């Protein structure tokens, strides 16, 4: 009888153990965040987003992830009340366990999905993560996912108020053919000017699109003794000089590395199609990832670095685009073909919007300031962001050095005058400094990396 009872006890014990789900702890790595950012970048290139719109695709998901991180990490401070219109995110349900990194990544992917076109590509990536997390710890995964979605909804509602939807219905840019100094569409696609109303997008930290209004460009003139004509001729002379050196010239390598033009059009007979390229903002988000990996930043600091950088980039585009359509300056290619050399072609294809100031210069200046604030000055790094797009690694001693090269690349490429890049990078740096001075994201400045070689 005792043997029967003992056997029953063993069966009951084994049965109960079999019914019990063993739930593992969930550790969300920075590599998973990097993979998500890379996937979004890949989709953006596929979908062909303009540089200003691409900056919007990055900034809102990063802020959503950051706000969740800041709620659970005493080293970080919420952006609510510091960024225009942003209110505190909802509190989590105290009765349910939350993995805050998982919730942050869920919010990041959910907001990203709302901002791209090819949602199915991101959903496939997301579902692969969901399946793995769910199989490890169903209870914790579901509670964390629910909270991430709740925060994504909160940030999404704030996002809807930034005037983006309203700008979709505003009139296209109108070409003024009577003013010889005003921008005109350029070959080969002769596209309309993109995002002429981007100055109406709600900024994140700067007071308005006009806060960092730069000095105007040199007065338009085709007098050979004028400052404007001298800059025009300089573009032509530099282009001819480096073209004679061939594709191995350092200037051409620099121009191609920082091209970042999502609108490059290629003609094949009667067909015209766009090649896939990264945007300027996406390149600098990639540099933020490079720095995070090199400094071995944990998940929370990686989110912090990406968020500060993306805010600087987003406001830089708002500031720059306001000036582009204010000064509405004609591109070098148009004038050189009309007045100097009808067969001349720039090293890079001219992008479809006015010349002044240089977008890459403004954005690079602002992003470099933000990244220096996060990772420290003289942070050397190998920029491999463009490797997937057929370009080699370039190495830099600091973020500011990289920004300076990005700026001058536009002159080497034949798409900007010198004033546009010199004034532009100053405009970006001033804007970047304003952001780091007016937005407090950390309690402890020791979070800045003190890299040693």
Image: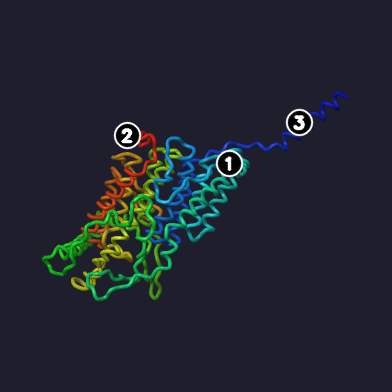
Residue 443 seen by the camera: yes
x and y percentages locating residue 2 in the rendered image? 86, 23
Label 2 crowd (10 A; few <14 / some 14-19 / many >=20): few
Element assignment for label 3: helix
Residue 249 shows in this picture:
no
Foreground of the two, 130 or 275: 130
Which tag is nearer the camera, tag 2 or tag 1?
1
Q: Mark on residue 452?
A: 2
User: Toward which corner of the image does residue 397 lie, by quadrant?
Assistant: top left
Measured as percent of width and height from the top left, residue 320 is found at 30, 58
Q: Are marks 2 and 1 in contact (CB under 8 Å)?
A: no
Give the spatial CA distance, label 3 vs label 1.
34 Å
Q: Give the camera-side residue of 136 and 149.
A: 149
Mark 3 or mark 2, earlier in chain: 3
Q: Residues within 10 Å of mark 1 (few under 14, many from 20)?
A: few
- The outermost residue toward the right is 1
Residue 211 location, x and y as percent? Answer: 29, 54
Q: Earlier in the sequence, mark 3 or mark 1?
A: 3
- Marks 2/1: CA–CA distance: 43 Å
For residue 260, which quarter of the picture? bottom left
Image label count? 3
Callout 1: SS: loop
Which of the two discs, 2 and 1, labels the residue nearer the N terminus?
1
Extreme residue toward the left, this view:
225
- Image quarter hosting the N terminus: top right
Would residue 281 be found to the left or right of residue 161 on screen?
left
Q: Is residue 374 above or below residue 211?
A: above
Between 306 and 133, the one lying in front of the other is 306
Give the residue at mark 1: 93
Answer few, some or many: residues within 10 Å of disc 3's Cα (few below 14, many 20 plus, some between 14 and 19).
Answer: few
Please name the residue that numbered disc 3 is placed on.
Answer: 13
């Amino acid at each position: 009888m005792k043997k029967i009872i003992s056997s029953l006890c063993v069966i009951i014990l084994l049965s109960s153990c079999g019914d019990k789900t063993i739930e593992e702890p969930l550790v969300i790595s920075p590599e998973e965040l990097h993979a998500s950012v890379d996937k979004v970048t890949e989709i953006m290139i596929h979908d062909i987003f303009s540089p200003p719109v691409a900056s919007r695709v990055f900034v809102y998901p990063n802020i959503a992830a950051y706000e969740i991180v800041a709620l659970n990490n005493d080293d970080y401070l919420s952006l609510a009340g510091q960024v225009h219109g942003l209110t505190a995110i909802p509190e989590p349900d105290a009765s349910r366990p939350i993995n805050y990194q998982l919730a942050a990544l869920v919010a990041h992917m959910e907001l990203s999905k709302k901002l791209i076109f090819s949602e199915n590509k991101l959903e496939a990536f997301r579902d692969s993560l969901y399946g793995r997390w769910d199989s490890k710890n169903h209870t914790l995964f579901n509670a964390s996912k629910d909270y991430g979605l709740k925060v994504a909804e909160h940030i999404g509602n704030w996002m809807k108020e930034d005037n983006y939807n309203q700008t979709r219905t505003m009139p296209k840019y109108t070409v003024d053919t009577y003013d010889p100094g005003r921008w005109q569409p350029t070959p080969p696609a002769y596209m309309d000017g993109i995002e002429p109303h981007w100055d109406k997008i709600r900024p994140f930290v700067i007071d308005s699109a006009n806060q960092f209004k730069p000095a105007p460009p040199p007065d338009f003139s085709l007098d050979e003794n004028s400052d404007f004509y001298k800059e025009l001729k300089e573009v032509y002379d530099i282009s001819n000089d480096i073209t004679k050196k061939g594709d191995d010239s350092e200037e051409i390598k620099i121009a191609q590395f920082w091209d970042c033009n999502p609108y490059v059009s290629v003609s094949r007979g009667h067909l015209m199609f766009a090649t896939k390229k990264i945007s300027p903002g996406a390149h600098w988000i990639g540099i933020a990832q490079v720095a995070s990996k090199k400094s071995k930043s944990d998940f929370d600091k990686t989110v912090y670095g990406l968020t500060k950088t993306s805010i600087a980039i987003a406001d830089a585009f708002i500031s720059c685009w306001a000036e582009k359509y204010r000064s509405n300056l004609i591109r070098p290619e148009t004038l050189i073909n009309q007045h100097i050399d009808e067969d001349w072609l720039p090293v890079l294809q001219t992008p479809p919007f006015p010349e002044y100031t240089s977008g890459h210069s403004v954005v690079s200046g602002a992003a470099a300031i933000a990244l220096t604030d996060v990772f420290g000055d003289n942070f050397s790094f190998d920029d491999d962001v463009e490797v997937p797009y057929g370009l080699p690694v370039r190495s830099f001693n600091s973020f500011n050095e990289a920004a300076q090269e990005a700026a001058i690349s536009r002159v080497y490429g034949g798409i900007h005058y010198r004033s546009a890049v010199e004034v532009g990078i100053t405009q970006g740096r001033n804007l970047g400094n304003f952001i780091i001075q007016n937005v407090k994201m950390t309690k402890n400045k020791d979070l800045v990396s003190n890299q040693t070689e």
